[in-house]
Image (spheres, grey):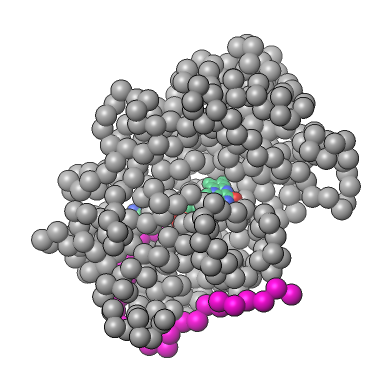
Protein backbone atom coordinates (compact mmCIF):
# COMPACT_ATOMS: atom_id res chain seq x y z
CA UNK A 1 0.00 0.00 0.00
CA UNK A 2 1.46 3.42 -0.95
CA UNK A 3 2.48 5.49 2.07
CA UNK A 4 0.83 8.81 2.93
CA UNK A 5 3.47 11.33 3.98
CA UNK A 6 1.49 14.53 4.11
CA UNK A 7 -1.79 13.86 5.84
CA UNK A 8 -4.27 16.63 6.59
CA UNK A 9 -3.53 17.84 10.12
CA UNK A 10 -5.86 20.57 11.38
CA UNK A 11 -4.81 22.86 14.24
CA UNK A 12 -6.73 22.66 17.50
CA UNK A 13 -7.05 26.40 17.84
CA UNK A 14 -8.10 28.85 15.16
CA UNK A 15 -7.01 32.49 15.15
CA UNK A 16 -8.38 34.76 12.45
CA UNK A 17 -10.76 34.17 9.56
CA UNK A 18 -10.60 33.92 5.81
CA UNK A 19 -13.60 34.35 3.50
CA UNK A 20 -13.66 31.83 0.66
CA UNK A 21 -15.99 32.40 -2.27
CA UNK A 22 -16.72 29.17 -4.14
CA UNK A 23 -16.56 25.56 -2.95
CA UNK A 24 -14.91 23.95 -5.97
CA UNK A 25 -11.53 22.18 -5.68
CA UNK A 26 -9.78 25.53 -5.04
CA UNK A 27 -12.19 26.59 -2.28
CA UNK A 28 -12.18 23.14 -0.64
CA UNK A 29 -8.41 22.76 -0.53
CA UNK A 30 -8.03 26.39 0.55
CA UNK A 31 -10.36 25.64 3.48
CA UNK A 32 -8.45 22.50 4.47
CA UNK A 33 -5.13 24.34 4.27
CA UNK A 34 -6.54 27.23 6.33
CA UNK A 35 -7.47 24.76 9.08
CA UNK A 36 -3.95 23.34 9.04
CA UNK A 37 -2.48 26.80 9.49
CA UNK A 38 -4.89 27.86 12.24
CA UNK A 39 -7.28 30.07 10.22
CA UNK A 40 -11.05 29.66 10.28
CA UNK A 41 -12.37 29.24 6.73
CA UNK A 42 -15.82 30.70 6.06
CA UNK A 43 -17.07 29.43 2.72
CA UNK A 44 -19.86 30.82 0.58
CA UNK A 45 -21.11 28.63 -2.25
CA UNK A 46 -23.95 29.85 -4.44
CA UNK A 47 -25.03 26.33 -5.37
CA UNK A 48 -26.46 23.42 -3.37
CA UNK A 49 -24.86 20.47 -1.57
CA UNK A 50 -23.94 17.48 -3.78
CA UNK A 51 -27.05 15.46 -3.04
CA UNK A 52 -29.54 18.25 -3.88
CA UNK A 53 -27.44 19.13 -6.88
CA UNK A 54 -27.85 15.64 -8.31
CA UNK A 55 -31.63 16.20 -8.66
CA UNK A 56 -31.06 19.35 -10.70
CA UNK A 57 -28.70 17.47 -13.01
CA UNK A 58 -31.35 14.80 -13.61
CA UNK A 59 -33.85 17.56 -14.55
CA UNK A 60 -31.27 19.15 -16.85
CA UNK A 61 -30.55 15.85 -18.61
CA UNK A 62 -34.17 14.69 -18.87
CA UNK A 63 -36.16 17.91 -19.21
CA UNK A 64 -33.54 20.30 -20.63
CA UNK A 65 -34.14 22.79 -17.79
CA UNK A 66 -30.98 24.66 -16.71
CA UNK A 67 -30.98 25.90 -13.13
CA UNK A 68 -28.42 28.76 -13.11
CA UNK A 69 -27.77 28.12 -9.41
CA UNK A 70 -27.33 24.35 -9.68
CA UNK A 71 -25.78 22.55 -12.66
CA UNK A 72 -22.59 20.77 -13.79
CA UNK A 73 -20.46 23.83 -12.95
CA UNK A 74 -22.28 25.36 -9.96
CA UNK A 75 -22.66 23.71 -6.54
CA UNK A 76 -20.72 21.83 -3.88
CA UNK A 77 -17.40 20.58 -5.26
CA UNK A 78 -17.68 23.01 -8.19
CA UNK A 79 -17.13 21.83 -11.74
CA UNK A 80 -14.99 19.06 -10.25
CA UNK A 81 -17.85 17.11 -8.61
CA UNK A 82 -19.49 15.51 -11.62
CA UNK A 83 -16.32 15.66 -13.65
CA UNK A 84 -14.28 12.74 -14.83
CA UNK A 85 -11.97 13.11 -11.87
CA UNK A 86 -8.83 12.72 -13.95
CA UNK A 87 -6.14 13.95 -11.64
CA UNK A 88 -3.35 14.58 -14.11
CA UNK A 89 -1.80 17.98 -14.21
CA UNK A 90 0.96 19.83 -15.96
CA UNK A 91 1.82 21.46 -12.63
CA UNK A 92 5.54 21.03 -12.09
CA UNK A 93 5.55 21.13 -8.30
CA UNK A 94 5.67 17.46 -7.53
CA UNK A 95 5.41 17.99 -3.77
CA UNK A 96 2.18 19.98 -4.05
CA UNK A 97 0.68 17.47 -6.47
CA UNK A 98 1.56 14.59 -4.15
CA UNK A 99 0.05 16.33 -1.11
CA UNK A 100 -3.19 17.00 -3.02
CA UNK A 101 -3.44 13.35 -4.10
CA UNK A 102 -2.70 12.18 -0.54
CA UNK A 103 -5.53 14.31 0.81
CA UNK A 104 -7.88 12.83 -1.80
CA UNK A 105 -6.93 9.38 -0.50
CA UNK A 106 -7.38 10.44 3.11
CA UNK A 107 -10.93 11.52 2.28
CA UNK A 108 -11.84 8.30 0.52
CA UNK A 109 -10.18 7.96 -2.90
CA UNK A 110 -8.49 4.65 -3.77
CA UNK A 111 -4.78 4.75 -2.92
CA UNK A 112 -3.78 3.63 -6.42
CA UNK A 113 -4.08 7.30 -7.47
CA UNK A 114 -0.80 7.83 -5.59
CA UNK A 115 1.11 5.61 -7.98
CA UNK A 116 -0.87 5.67 -11.25
CA UNK A 117 0.71 7.62 -14.09
CA UNK A 118 -2.80 8.82 -15.03
CA UNK A 119 -4.81 8.86 -11.79
CA UNK A 120 -8.61 8.92 -12.18
CA UNK A 121 -11.43 8.85 -9.62
CA UNK A 122 -14.69 8.83 -11.61
CA UNK A 123 -17.95 10.77 -11.27
CA UNK A 124 -19.62 8.08 -9.15
CA UNK A 125 -16.92 8.27 -6.44
CA UNK A 126 -16.22 12.01 -6.30
CA UNK A 127 -19.38 13.14 -4.42
CA UNK A 128 -18.68 11.06 -1.29
CA UNK A 129 -15.08 12.34 -1.18
CA UNK A 130 -16.37 15.90 -1.38
CA UNK A 131 -18.87 15.26 1.44
CA UNK A 132 -16.05 13.82 3.60
CA UNK A 133 -13.98 16.96 2.97
CA UNK A 134 -16.92 19.20 3.87
CA UNK A 135 -17.50 17.23 7.09
CA UNK A 136 -13.83 17.60 8.06
CA UNK A 137 -14.02 21.35 7.46
CA UNK A 138 -17.11 21.63 9.68
CA UNK A 139 -15.75 19.33 12.41
CA UNK A 140 -12.59 21.38 12.65
CA UNK A 141 -14.26 24.74 13.04
CA UNK A 142 -14.89 25.97 9.50
CA UNK A 143 -18.23 27.22 8.14
CA UNK A 144 -19.80 26.15 4.85
CA UNK A 145 -22.80 28.12 3.58
CA UNK A 146 -24.70 26.76 0.58
CA UNK A 147 -27.09 28.78 -1.58
CA UNK A 148 -25.05 31.80 -0.51
CA UNK A 149 -24.14 33.83 -3.54
CA UNK A 150 -21.68 36.68 -3.21
CA UNK A 151 -23.37 39.65 -4.84
CA UNK A 152 -21.03 42.49 -3.85
CA UNK A 153 -17.62 43.26 -2.40
CA UNK A 154 -17.04 46.00 0.15
CA UNK A 155 -13.74 47.86 0.23
CA UNK A 156 -12.19 50.94 1.78
CA UNK A 157 -8.97 52.71 0.80
CA UNK A 158 -8.03 49.96 -1.65
CA UNK A 159 -8.56 47.13 0.85
CA UNK A 160 -11.31 44.53 1.00
CA UNK A 161 -13.59 44.91 4.05
CA UNK A 162 -16.41 42.47 3.45
CA UNK A 163 -18.81 40.49 1.28
CA UNK A 164 -22.49 40.85 0.50
CA UNK A 165 -24.41 37.56 0.49
CA UNK A 166 -27.56 37.06 -1.59
CA UNK A 167 -28.01 40.81 -1.99
CA UNK A 168 -28.68 41.44 1.69
CA UNK A 169 -26.49 40.10 4.49
CA UNK A 170 -22.98 41.52 5.00
CA UNK A 171 -19.95 39.79 6.56
CA UNK A 172 -16.71 41.53 7.31
CA UNK A 173 -13.41 40.08 6.07
CA UNK A 174 -9.90 41.38 5.69
CA UNK A 175 -8.91 38.50 3.43
CA UNK A 176 -11.04 36.89 0.75
CA UNK A 177 -10.12 34.08 -1.64
CA UNK A 178 -12.07 34.43 -4.86
CA UNK A 179 -12.39 30.89 -6.23
CA UNK A 180 -15.53 31.20 -8.32
CA UNK A 181 -14.53 29.20 -11.42
CA UNK A 182 -14.66 30.04 -15.11
CA UNK A 183 -18.45 30.21 -15.33
CA UNK A 184 -19.03 32.98 -12.76
CA UNK A 185 -19.77 35.64 -15.36
CA UNK A 186 -21.58 37.87 -12.84
CA UNK A 187 -18.39 38.03 -10.75
CA UNK A 188 -16.43 39.30 -13.78
CA UNK A 189 -19.17 41.93 -14.33
CA UNK A 190 -19.03 42.93 -10.67
CA UNK A 191 -15.24 43.36 -10.68
CA UNK A 192 -15.49 45.44 -13.85
CA UNK A 193 -18.23 47.64 -12.36
CA UNK A 194 -16.02 48.27 -9.34
CA UNK A 195 -13.37 49.62 -11.72
CA UNK A 196 -10.90 46.88 -10.72
CA UNK A 197 -8.67 45.50 -13.47
CA UNK A 198 -9.55 42.49 -15.61
CA UNK A 199 -7.79 41.22 -18.73
CA UNK A 200 -8.99 39.29 -21.75
CA UNK A 201 -7.31 35.87 -21.71
CA UNK A 202 -6.55 33.26 -24.36
CA UNK A 203 -8.67 30.14 -24.15
CA UNK A 204 -9.79 27.39 -26.52
CA UNK A 205 -13.08 26.47 -28.16
CA UNK A 206 -14.22 23.68 -30.43
CA UNK A 207 -16.34 20.54 -30.34
CA UNK A 208 -16.71 17.36 -28.30
CA UNK A 209 -16.16 14.28 -30.43
CA UNK A 210 -17.53 10.86 -29.58
CA UNK A 211 -16.39 7.52 -31.06
CA UNK A 212 -17.40 3.99 -30.12
CA UNK A 213 -14.94 2.99 -27.35
CA UNK A 214 -14.31 -0.30 -29.14
CA UNK A 215 -12.99 1.60 -32.15
CA UNK A 216 -10.58 3.65 -30.02
CA UNK A 217 -9.44 0.42 -28.29
CA UNK A 218 -8.87 -1.20 -31.68
CA UNK A 219 -6.79 1.78 -32.88
CA UNK A 220 -4.74 2.17 -29.71
CA UNK A 221 -4.29 -1.52 -28.89
CA UNK A 222 -3.66 -2.52 -32.53
CA UNK A 223 -6.78 -4.64 -32.86
CA UNK A 224 -6.82 -6.09 -29.33
CA UNK A 225 -10.31 -5.47 -27.85
CA UNK A 226 -12.61 -6.84 -25.10
CA UNK A 227 -9.60 -7.80 -23.03
CA UNK A 228 -10.31 -7.66 -19.27
CA UNK A 229 -6.64 -6.99 -18.54
CA UNK A 230 -6.38 -3.73 -20.44
CA UNK A 231 -8.30 -0.55 -19.58
CA UNK A 232 -10.48 1.32 -22.09
CA UNK A 233 -8.00 3.19 -24.29
CA UNK A 234 -7.52 6.93 -24.30
CA UNK A 235 -5.70 9.30 -26.65
CA UNK A 236 -4.05 12.68 -26.59
CA UNK A 237 -3.73 14.61 -29.84
CA UNK A 238 -2.13 17.92 -30.63
CA UNK A 239 -1.24 19.76 -33.81
CA UNK A 240 -0.45 23.24 -35.12
CA UNK A 241 -2.65 24.65 -37.87
CA UNK A 242 -1.47 27.94 -39.37
CA UNK A 243 0.57 28.57 -36.22
CA UNK A 244 -2.43 27.93 -33.95
CA UNK A 245 -2.67 25.08 -31.44
CA UNK A 246 -5.51 22.56 -31.90
CA UNK A 247 -5.64 19.75 -29.36
CA UNK A 248 -7.70 17.13 -27.59
CA UNK A 249 -8.98 18.23 -24.18
CA UNK A 250 -10.33 16.24 -21.22
CA UNK A 251 -10.53 12.89 -23.02
CA UNK A 252 -12.99 10.52 -21.29
CA UNK A 253 -12.69 6.81 -22.16
CA UNK A 254 -15.95 4.95 -21.49
CA UNK A 255 -17.58 8.31 -20.83
CA UNK A 256 -20.63 10.49 -21.32
CA UNK A 257 -21.01 13.84 -23.09
CA UNK A 258 -22.66 16.17 -20.58
CA UNK A 259 -24.80 19.32 -20.95
CA UNK A 260 -22.76 21.94 -19.08
CA UNK A 261 -24.66 25.18 -19.74
CA UNK A 262 -24.95 27.44 -16.70
CA UNK A 263 -27.83 29.59 -17.96
CA UNK A 264 -30.87 29.35 -20.22
CA UNK A 265 -30.21 30.40 -23.81
CA UNK A 266 -26.87 28.64 -24.28
CA UNK A 267 -25.52 25.17 -25.06
CA UNK A 268 -22.18 23.92 -23.67
CA UNK A 269 -20.69 20.41 -23.72
CA UNK A 270 -18.05 18.66 -21.61
CA UNK A 271 -17.45 15.04 -20.65
CA UNK A 272 -17.18 12.71 -17.68
CA UNK A 273 -16.75 9.02 -16.97
CA UNK A 274 -17.45 6.67 -14.08
CA UNK A 275 -14.60 4.99 -12.21
CA UNK A 276 -14.90 1.81 -14.31
CA UNK A 277 -15.04 3.76 -17.57
CA UNK A 278 -17.48 1.17 -18.81
CA UNK A 279 -19.76 3.14 -21.13
CA UNK A 280 -19.60 2.15 -24.80
CA UNK A 281 -18.36 5.58 -25.96
CA UNK A 282 -15.08 7.52 -25.89
CA UNK A 283 -15.37 11.30 -25.94
CA UNK A 284 -12.95 14.21 -26.00
CA UNK A 285 -12.94 17.93 -26.58
CA UNK A 286 -11.10 18.96 -29.76
CA UNK A 287 -10.41 22.64 -29.36
CA UNK A 288 -8.77 25.54 -31.19
CA UNK A 289 -6.72 28.14 -29.27
CA UNK A 290 -8.15 31.65 -29.42
CA UNK A 291 -6.20 34.69 -28.30
CA UNK A 292 -7.46 38.24 -27.68
CA UNK A 293 -5.39 39.28 -30.76
CA UNK A 294 -7.71 37.20 -32.97
CA UNK A 295 -10.69 39.37 -32.07
CA UNK A 296 -11.71 42.88 -33.06
CA UNK A 297 -13.19 43.55 -29.62
CA UNK A 298 -10.36 44.96 -27.51
CA UNK A 299 -12.22 45.00 -24.18
CA UNK A 300 -11.40 42.66 -21.26
CA UNK A 301 -14.60 40.83 -22.24
CA UNK A 302 -13.48 40.09 -25.83
CA UNK A 303 -12.89 36.34 -25.38
CA UNK A 304 -15.86 35.96 -23.03
CA UNK A 305 -18.15 37.65 -25.58
CA UNK A 306 -16.82 35.36 -28.32
CA UNK A 307 -17.49 32.32 -26.09
CA UNK A 308 -21.00 33.55 -25.23
CA UNK A 309 -21.92 34.26 -28.87
CA UNK A 310 -20.97 30.73 -29.94
CA UNK A 311 -22.87 29.12 -27.05
CA UNK A 312 -25.99 31.22 -27.76
CA UNK A 313 -25.89 30.58 -31.51
CA UNK A 314 -25.68 26.82 -30.87
CA UNK A 315 -28.72 27.06 -28.63
CA UNK A 316 -30.74 29.06 -31.17
CA UNK A 317 -29.83 26.88 -34.15
CA UNK A 318 -30.38 23.55 -32.37
CA UNK A 319 -33.96 24.40 -31.38
CA UNK A 320 -33.71 26.59 -28.26
CA UNK A 321 -33.48 23.69 -25.86
CA UNK A 322 -30.52 21.78 -24.49
CA UNK A 323 -30.30 19.86 -27.77
CA UNK A 324 -26.81 20.10 -29.18
CA UNK A 325 -25.87 20.85 -32.81
CA UNK A 326 -24.23 17.66 -34.09
CA UNK A 327 -22.70 16.19 -37.24
CA UNK A 328 -20.92 13.05 -38.33
CA UNK A 329 -17.18 13.69 -38.60
CA UNK A 330 -16.66 13.03 -42.34
CA UNK A 331 -19.79 15.04 -43.17
CA UNK A 332 -18.25 17.97 -41.28
CA UNK A 333 -15.07 17.69 -43.35
CA UNK A 334 -17.16 17.58 -46.55
CA UNK A 335 -19.42 20.43 -45.38
CA UNK A 336 -22.70 18.53 -45.62
CA UNK A 337 -25.42 18.13 -43.01
CA UNK A 338 -25.67 14.53 -41.78
CA UNK A 339 -28.78 12.69 -43.01
CA UNK A 340 -28.94 10.86 -39.72
CA UNK A 341 -26.87 10.79 -36.53
CA UNK A 342 -25.44 7.80 -34.66
CA UNK A 343 -26.49 7.12 -31.07
CA UNK A 344 -24.75 9.54 -28.70
CA UNK A 345 -24.37 9.53 -24.93
CA UNK A 346 -25.54 13.18 -24.78
CA UNK A 347 -28.91 12.80 -23.07
CA UNK A 348 -30.87 15.96 -23.98
CA UNK A 349 -30.63 15.03 -27.69
CA UNK A 350 -29.00 16.27 -30.89
CA UNK A 351 -30.04 18.40 -33.88
CA UNK A 352 -28.34 17.58 -37.18
CA UNK A 353 -26.70 20.74 -38.54
CA UNK A 354 -23.66 21.58 -40.65
CA UNK A 355 -21.28 22.81 -37.94
CA UNK A 356 -19.40 24.80 -40.58
CA UNK A 357 -22.42 27.09 -40.53
CA UNK A 358 -22.78 27.08 -36.77
CA UNK A 359 -19.20 27.70 -35.64
CA UNK A 360 -17.11 30.78 -36.49
CA UNK A 361 -14.83 30.16 -39.51
CA UNK A 362 -11.70 30.55 -37.37
CA UNK A 363 -12.87 27.50 -35.42
CA UNK A 364 -14.36 25.31 -38.17
CA UNK A 365 -11.53 25.80 -40.71
CA UNK A 366 -8.81 25.04 -38.17
CA UNK A 367 -10.74 22.08 -36.78
CA UNK A 368 -11.05 20.52 -40.23
CA UNK A 369 -7.33 20.72 -40.90
CA UNK A 370 -6.55 19.38 -37.45
CA UNK A 371 -8.90 16.42 -37.86
CA UNK A 372 -7.13 15.47 -41.11
CA UNK A 373 -3.80 15.54 -39.29
CA UNK A 374 -5.21 13.48 -36.39
CA UNK A 375 -6.46 10.93 -38.95
CA UNK A 376 -2.87 10.50 -40.13
CA UNK A 377 -1.65 9.93 -36.57
CA UNK A 378 -4.47 7.60 -35.51
CA UNK A 379 -5.65 5.33 -38.29
CA UNK A 380 -9.47 5.04 -38.40
CA UNK A 381 -10.01 8.14 -36.16
CA UNK A 382 -11.56 9.76 -39.25
CA UNK A 383 -14.84 7.90 -39.55
CA UNK A 384 -18.50 8.75 -39.98
CA UNK A 385 -19.16 6.59 -36.91
CA UNK A 386 -17.78 9.55 -34.94
CA UNK A 387 -20.12 12.41 -34.09
CA UNK A 388 -19.08 15.93 -33.13
CA UNK A 389 -21.16 18.03 -30.71
CA UNK A 390 -20.86 21.82 -30.50
CA UNK A 391 -19.62 23.69 -28.65
CA UNK A 392 -16.88 22.64 -26.21
CA UNK A 393 -16.34 26.15 -24.89
CA UNK A 394 -15.57 26.14 -21.15
CA UNK A 395 -12.03 24.85 -21.43
CA UNK A 396 -10.51 27.58 -19.27
CA UNK A 397 -11.39 31.09 -18.21
CA UNK A 398 -11.64 33.64 -21.04
CA UNK A 399 -10.77 36.36 -18.51
CA UNK A 400 -7.85 36.81 -16.17
CA UNK A 401 -8.33 38.56 -12.84
CA UNK A 402 -4.84 39.96 -12.24
CA UNK A 403 -2.81 39.43 -9.08
CA UNK A 404 0.65 40.50 -7.94
CA UNK A 405 3.51 38.44 -6.52
CA UNK A 406 1.70 38.50 -3.17
CA UNK A 407 -1.31 36.96 -5.02
CA UNK A 408 -3.50 39.97 -4.17
CA UNK A 409 -5.43 41.96 -6.74
CA UNK A 410 -3.39 45.08 -7.58
CA UNK A 411 -6.43 47.35 -7.05
CA UNK A 412 -7.80 45.81 -3.86
CA UNK A 413 -5.58 44.38 -1.17
CA UNK A 414 -6.92 41.39 0.68
CA UNK A 415 -8.66 40.01 -2.43
CA UNK A 416 -6.93 36.85 -3.70
CA UNK A 417 -8.06 35.93 -7.26
CA UNK A 418 -7.66 32.17 -7.26
CA UNK A 419 -7.53 29.14 -9.55
CA UNK A 420 -9.43 28.51 -12.76
CA UNK A 421 -11.87 31.42 -12.75
CA UNK A 422 -9.10 33.96 -12.26
CA UNK A 423 -6.92 32.30 -14.90
CA UNK A 424 -4.31 30.63 -12.67
CA UNK A 425 -5.29 26.97 -12.91
CA UNK A 426 -6.80 24.47 -15.30
CA UNK A 427 -8.17 21.28 -13.81
CA UNK A 428 -8.84 19.85 -10.38
CA UNK A 429 -5.29 19.42 -9.11
CA UNK A 430 -3.92 22.78 -10.22
CA UNK A 431 -7.04 24.52 -8.82
CA UNK A 432 -6.61 22.73 -5.47
CA UNK A 433 -2.92 23.67 -5.35
CA UNK A 434 -3.70 27.31 -6.13
CA UNK A 435 -6.30 27.39 -3.34
CA UNK A 436 -3.68 26.21 -0.84
CA UNK A 437 -1.13 28.66 -2.21
CA UNK A 438 -3.47 31.62 -1.61
CA UNK A 439 -3.92 30.57 2.03
CA UNK A 440 -0.16 30.31 2.49
CA UNK A 441 0.20 33.89 1.20
CA UNK A 442 -2.48 35.18 3.57
CA UNK A 443 -0.87 33.49 6.53
CA UNK A 444 2.54 34.75 5.47
CA UNK A 445 1.18 38.30 5.33
CA UNK A 446 -0.94 38.25 8.48
CA UNK A 447 0.80 35.85 10.76
CA UNK A 448 4.41 36.05 9.66
CA UNK A 449 5.94 34.95 12.93
CA UNK A 450 3.35 32.24 13.55
CA UNK A 451 3.70 30.80 10.06
CA UNK A 452 7.45 30.66 9.91
CA UNK A 453 8.19 29.56 13.49
CA UNK A 454 5.46 26.98 13.84
CA UNK A 455 4.92 25.53 10.40
CA UNK A 456 8.34 25.27 8.84
C1 LIG B 1 -18.04 17.84 -16.89
C2 LIG B 1 -16.66 18.29 -16.48
C3 LIG B 1 -15.63 17.36 -16.47
C4 LIG B 1 -14.35 17.73 -16.04
N1 LIG B 1 -13.39 16.77 -15.95
C5 LIG B 1 -12.19 17.09 -15.39
C6 LIG B 1 -11.22 16.09 -15.14
O1 LIG B 1 -11.43 14.91 -15.41
N2 LIG B 1 -10.04 16.46 -14.57
C7 LIG B 1 -9.76 17.76 -14.23
O2 LIG B 1 -8.67 18.04 -13.72
N3 LIG B 1 -10.68 18.72 -14.46
C8 LIG B 1 -11.88 18.41 -15.00
N4 LIG B 1 -12.82 19.40 -15.20
C9 LIG B 1 -12.45 20.77 -14.86
C10 LIG B 1 -12.43 20.98 -13.35
O3 LIG B 1 -13.64 20.55 -12.81
C11 LIG B 1 -12.15 22.43 -13.05
O4 LIG B 1 -10.89 22.75 -13.61
C12 LIG B 1 -12.09 22.71 -11.55
O5 LIG B 1 -13.28 22.33 -10.94
C13 LIG B 1 -11.81 24.20 -11.28
O6 LIG B 1 -11.81 24.41 -9.92
P1 LIG B 1 -12.15 25.81 -9.24
O7 LIG B 1 -12.25 25.55 -7.80
O8 LIG B 1 -11.17 26.82 -9.73
O9 LIG B 1 -13.56 26.27 -9.84
P2 LIG B 1 -14.96 25.54 -9.89
O10 LIG B 1 -14.82 24.10 -9.74
O11 LIG B 1 -15.63 26.07 -11.10
O12 LIG B 1 -15.71 26.05 -8.58
C14 LIG B 1 -16.17 27.36 -8.44
C15 LIG B 1 -17.32 27.39 -7.46
O13 LIG B 1 -17.65 28.75 -7.17
C16 LIG B 1 -19.04 28.87 -7.04
N5 LIG B 1 -19.42 30.27 -7.29
C17 LIG B 1 -19.40 30.94 -8.47
N6 LIG B 1 -19.82 32.22 -8.29
C18 LIG B 1 -20.11 32.34 -6.97
C19 LIG B 1 -20.62 33.43 -6.19
N7 LIG B 1 -20.89 34.62 -6.72
N8 LIG B 1 -20.82 33.21 -4.86
C20 LIG B 1 -20.55 32.00 -4.30
N9 LIG B 1 -20.10 30.94 -5.02
C21 LIG B 1 -19.87 31.12 -6.33
C22 LIG B 1 -19.58 27.92 -8.10
O14 LIG B 1 -20.89 27.55 -7.78
C23 LIG B 1 -18.60 26.77 -8.01
O15 LIG B 1 -19.05 25.76 -7.14
C24 LIG B 1 -14.10 19.07 -15.64
C25 LIG B 1 -15.15 20.01 -15.67
C26 LIG B 1 -16.40 19.63 -16.08
C27 LIG B 1 -17.52 20.66 -16.10
Q: Is residue 450 left or right of residue 257?
A: left
Comparing 39 with 171, the one in front is 39
Relative to 285, residue 99 above or below: below
Secondary structure predominantly adopted by residues drawn in magenta: loop
Comparing 205 with 268, the one in front is 205
Q: Position of residue 370 (x, y in %)?
A: 60, 24
Q: Position of residue 289 (x, y in %)?
A: 47, 32
Quadrant position of the N terminus in the picture = bottom right
Residue at the image point whose x is 48% and y is 49% from the top: 426
Residue at the image point whose x is 79% and y is 38% from the top: 220
Residue at the image point whose x is 54% and y is 24% from the top: 241
Comparing 236 with 301, the one in front is 236
Q: Is residue 424 left or right of residue 194?
A: right
Quadrant position of the C terminus in the picture = bottom left
Comparing 248 with 261, the one in front is 248
Q: Is residue 128 magenta?
A: no
Amino acid sequence: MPKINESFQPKNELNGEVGIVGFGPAGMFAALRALELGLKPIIFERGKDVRSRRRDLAILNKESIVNPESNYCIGEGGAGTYSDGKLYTRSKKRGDVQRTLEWFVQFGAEDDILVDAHPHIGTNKLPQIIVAMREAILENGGEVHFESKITDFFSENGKITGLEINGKEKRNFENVILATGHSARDIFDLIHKKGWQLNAKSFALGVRIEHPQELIDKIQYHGRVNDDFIPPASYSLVTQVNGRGVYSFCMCPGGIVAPCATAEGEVVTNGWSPSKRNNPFANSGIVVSISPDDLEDKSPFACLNFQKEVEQKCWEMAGKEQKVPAQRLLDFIEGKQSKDLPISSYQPGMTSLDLNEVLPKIISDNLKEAFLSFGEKMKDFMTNEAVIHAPESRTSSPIQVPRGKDLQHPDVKGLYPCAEGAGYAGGIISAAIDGMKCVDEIVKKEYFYYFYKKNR
